[in-house]
Image (cartoon, helix red, strand yellow):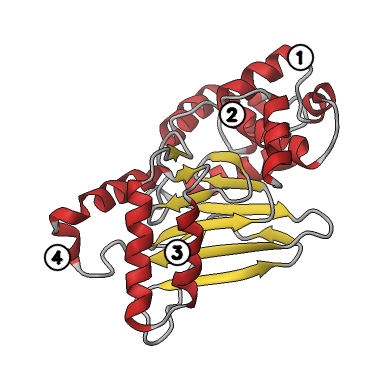
Amino acid sequence: MRAQLERVEVKRGHSFFAADYPIRRRLDHEYHHHPELEIALVVGMSGTLQCGATTSSFRSGQLFLLGPNVPHRFTGTLPHGSAGRAFVVQLRPDWLGERFLALPETFGFRDLVERSRLGLSLRDPDSRIRRRLTAVTRAEGMSRLVHLLSLIATMVESPGWTEVTGAPLRMKRQTRDISRIQTLQDTLRERFRDQIEEAAIAELLGFTRTSFCRWIRSVTGRTFTEILNDHRIANAVLLLQQTDLPVARVALECGYGSLSHFYREFRRRQKSDPSAVRRSSRLDGS
């Protein structure tokens, strides 16, 4: 499987795509890419985001900015009885023309677009962002442009943006590389609980173990073990948010035989302890 090219359809009379739609039960888009910049926010549910070669968890209300042609896929399941919504804006970075991007006032936007090639996340966005996202999806005419520019200005001014992935995986790479990355991600999504041998994954993808190690580092800037731990910790976050399983059981369910190893990897990625993540999810209702 490889990332599918999504053709973003912009309505007549509009210069960019914007939508606000309900999530019925599951959020499970295809792994895809498009030349447009994407602003995305999901409320009412948590889940996982595959961005390039990185898999991470997201929570309700977290904002994402994904650069042009960055392959990505959001997945998640609504808690029983809950309601969820997704807000999406897709636009070409130069949708107002190249002269717009050359203006000195747009320096912050140009910088944000450049950084978005790694995927960017804002964990606790300003409350104005959701209001302006909603306004963009519902306005028409000049008001629509004004609301979008206001949204972008708020995003540029917002501190706390973090990179989703450690290295860009762009669609300029060979199709075979992208296909192999997706096969790797699909395998880890199904088997992250298992004790997976690196040599077995190398054979699955048509490599010797040594050549696989070189290849995965050159394509993603990361090791196989780091990518495997991404999957495990992302799923651990979901279990902590959505269940009352003890932390030790969560560790086992996610493939960690050693609790100390689980804590070490969890803190490295989440900058917090499992218990704190669980408490936070209860407070924000995600």
Mark in front: 4 vs 1: 4
Question: Which x, y percent locates residue 171?
Answer: 41, 52
Q: Quadrant of residue 281?
A: top right
As measured in the structure, the alpha-carbon distance from the residue carrying label 4 to the one carrying label 2 is: 40 Å
Q: Position of residue 176 (x, y in %)?
A: 48, 48
113 or 159, which lies in front?
159
> As drawn, is 166 to the left or to the right of 268?
left
Q: How many angstroms separate mark 4 from mark 1 (CA)?
A: 56 Å
* Position of 86 relative to 127 (above/below): below
* Circle 1 Cα neighbour tier, 10 Å, few/some/many (<14 / 14–19 / ≥20): few
Q: Where is mark 4, residue-wise?
A: 99
Pointer 4 or 1: first along the chain:
4
- Tag 2 near tag 3, CB within 8 Å: no
Distance between mark 4 and mark 3 Cα atoms:
25 Å
The image shows residue 236 at horizontal and vertical percentages of 72, 33
C-alpha separation, residue under disc 2 versus residue under disc 1: 18 Å
Q: Which residue is mark 2?
A: 270
Q: Is residue 48 visible?
A: yes
Which badge, 3 or 1, is on the more N-terminal residue?
Answer: 3
Which residue is denoted by mark 3 in the rendering? 132
